[in-house]
């Protein structure tokens, strides 16, 4: 067992609890938050691959998705008995995901400490707690433990919205909680059905039972479990029918909070999507369901973005639409397609954070997010406007940035998998995404400035600019050297196939 694996979850939780106790001590909160934030992306790079389990017997390593580069464990023949261990599995794909999550979390926290007039220990507590929860979801090979952190992450997201102070944020938080009170129990019921049928909540043991005929793979209760878990996946990631509330969640959070929230959505999408593929890939309907909801998210996301006047809602809907590219990669079911989809997930987490923080400078300077009331802001901070423009180019898939590589790979994968129509649709929607962004950029920065527009903050904090430059560097590095990500993801993709 590797003791550093649980540290990736324990450290942000411990920091979150301590920051909550230190509420009101601004200097101490800033110092501690930045120190732990710096460490978050470093720990996965220092941790060797392996498994860590708490209690019970060592989990069976029979599934290549988990077994890549991991030591062989002792097999327990009584697979029909309840597996009492909480298991974390850490391989190359998890390393990349948790590293990127740590990067986004650090810069979101770093920016929040500079842009807010008074540092809130509660707000920082929620950001760290949410980060810990998503890390646990990415690591967990125990589906009930995953559910527990799924719920904690949802509560942390609600708290981040409540701390924003934006008008009608309480209404959005309440709606998200009400929908969660429906979706989360359905996810739990799906897990309970798996437990009842297999005697286990350990994902690897469940897969072993299916592969070796210990349970009927076409049992109606198992099919119902698949549908319920799929529904929980839609809620957690923000795919239709939850795309409207998810974009509202982004718009009612502060920009740095929204940057982190969308990273939570992306990695929840990936983690639950991988589990659905691992357990239910033998059902053709699973593949088509993933493709259907992904296409629906892409079309509805861009359509709804075109109808908005609030730039936060526009970015929120575009972020939901970009999730569809990830889903198409997973739904294709080929190693190339899955690798490209997971690469797109990494890129979206970075680029959308870049956009949220970039456009957040407009909100910081003017206090306005309605594009009808904005204009002529290029002269205020041309360098920041240039960074925002680059972020939009990156989202649309313009070379040499990272999303160009992942979207190009997705198009190539769709053609090689026999779905050229998906490739054409992805290209068309990317063009529309670019046009939508250009329209917003022109409205905010280039058109004549309204006479009644006032600047409430003249100077943008250096931390915000540093964060934007850092995201730009990452976009360029992954765009020029995509193998840095795809090499880590290919093993997971091959295992899933």
Image: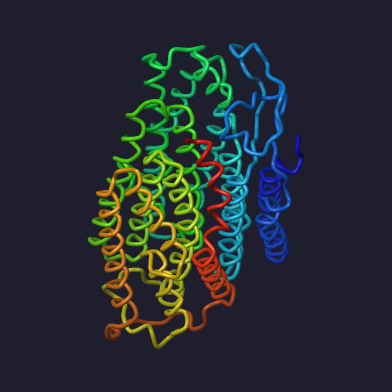
Seen from the viewer's position, the closer of residues 63 and 346 is 63
209 with respect to 379 (left or right): right
Q: Position of residue 129 (x, y in %)?
A: 60, 47
* Residue 171 seen in render: no
196 with respect to 140 (left or right): left
What residue is shown at x 51% (from left), y 67% (from top)?
A: 480
Q: Position of residue 37 (x, y in %)?
A: 66, 58
411 with respect to 472 (left or right): left
* Residue 221 seen in render: yes
128 with respect to 379 (left or right): right
Compared to residue 325, the image places residue 62 above or below, namely above
Tell me which corner region of the image, top left, top right, bottom left or bottom right, holds residue 138: top right
Q: Where is residue 483 in the image (x, y as percent from the top left)?
A: 55, 58
Work out which residue is located at the far front of the displayed protein and give it: 416
Compared to residue 123, the image places residue 329 above or below, namely above
Q: Position of residue 470 (x, y in %)?
A: 57, 70
Seen from the viewer's position, the closer of residues 152 and 415 is 415
Q: In which quadrant will I find the N terminus? A: top right
What residue is shown at x 38% (from left), y 39% (from top)?
A: 234
């Amino acid at each position: 067992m590797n003791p550093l694996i649980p540290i990736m979850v324990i450290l942000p939780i411990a920091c979150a609890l301590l920051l909550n106790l230190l509420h009101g001590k601004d200097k101490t909160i800033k110092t501690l938050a930045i120190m732990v934030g710096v460490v978050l992306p470093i720990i996965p790079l220092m941790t060797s691959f392996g498994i860590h389990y708490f209690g019970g017997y060592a989990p069976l390593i029979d599934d290549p998705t988990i077994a890549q580069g991991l030591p062989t464990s002792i097999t327990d023949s009584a697979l029909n008995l309840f597996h009492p261990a909480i298991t974390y599995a850490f391989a190359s794909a998890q390393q990349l995901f948790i590293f990127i999550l740590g990067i986004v979390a650090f810069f979101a926290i770093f920016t929040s400490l500079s842009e807010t007039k008074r540092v809130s220990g509660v707000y920082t507590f929620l950001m760290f707690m949410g980060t810990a929860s998503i890390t646990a979801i990415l690591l967990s090979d125990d589906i009930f433990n995953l559910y527990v952190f799924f719920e904690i992450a949802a509560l942390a997201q609600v708290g981040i919205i409540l701390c924003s102070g934006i008008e009608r944020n309480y209404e959005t938080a309440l709606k998200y909680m009400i929908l969660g009170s429906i979706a989360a129990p359905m996810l739990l019921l799906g897990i309970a059905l798996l437990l009842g049928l297999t005697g286990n909540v350990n994902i690897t043991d469940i897969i072993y039972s299916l592969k070796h005929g210990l349970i009927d793979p076409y049992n109606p209760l198992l099919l119902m479990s698949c549908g319920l878990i799929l529904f929980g996946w839609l809620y957690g990631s923000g795919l239709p029918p939850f795309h409207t509330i998810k974009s509202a969640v982004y718009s009612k959070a502060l920009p740095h909070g929204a940057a982190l929230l969308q990273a939570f959505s992306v990695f929840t999408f990936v983690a639950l999507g991988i589990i659905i593929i691992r357990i239910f890939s033998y059902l053709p309907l699973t593949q088509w369901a993933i493709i259907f909801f992904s296409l629906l998210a892409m079309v509805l996301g861009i359509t709804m973005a075109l109808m908005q006047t609030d730039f936060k809602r526009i970015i929120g809907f575009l972020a939901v639409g970009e999730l569809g590219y990830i889903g198409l990669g997973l739904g294709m079911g080929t190693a190339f397609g899955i690798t490209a989809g997971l690469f797109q997930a990494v890129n979206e987490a970075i680029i959308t954070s870049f956009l949220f923080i970039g456009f957040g400078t407009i909100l910081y300077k003017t206090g306005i997010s309605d594009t009808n009331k904005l204009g002529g802001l290029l002269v205020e901070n041309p360098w920041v406007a240039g960074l925002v423009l680059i972020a939009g180019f990156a989202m649309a898939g313009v070379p040499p940035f990272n999303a160009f590589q992942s979207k190009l790979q997705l198009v190539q994968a769709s053609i090689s998998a026999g779905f050229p129509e998906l490739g054409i649709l992805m290209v068309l929607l990317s063009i529309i995404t670019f046009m939508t962004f250009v329209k917003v950029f022109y409205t905010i920065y280039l058109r004549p400035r309204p006479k009644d527009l006032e600047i409430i903050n003249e100077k943008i904090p250096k931390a915000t600019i540093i964060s934007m430059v850092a995201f730009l560097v990452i976009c360029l590095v992954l765009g020029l050297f995509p193998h840095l990500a795809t090499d880590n993801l290919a093993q997971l993709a091959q295992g899933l196939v």
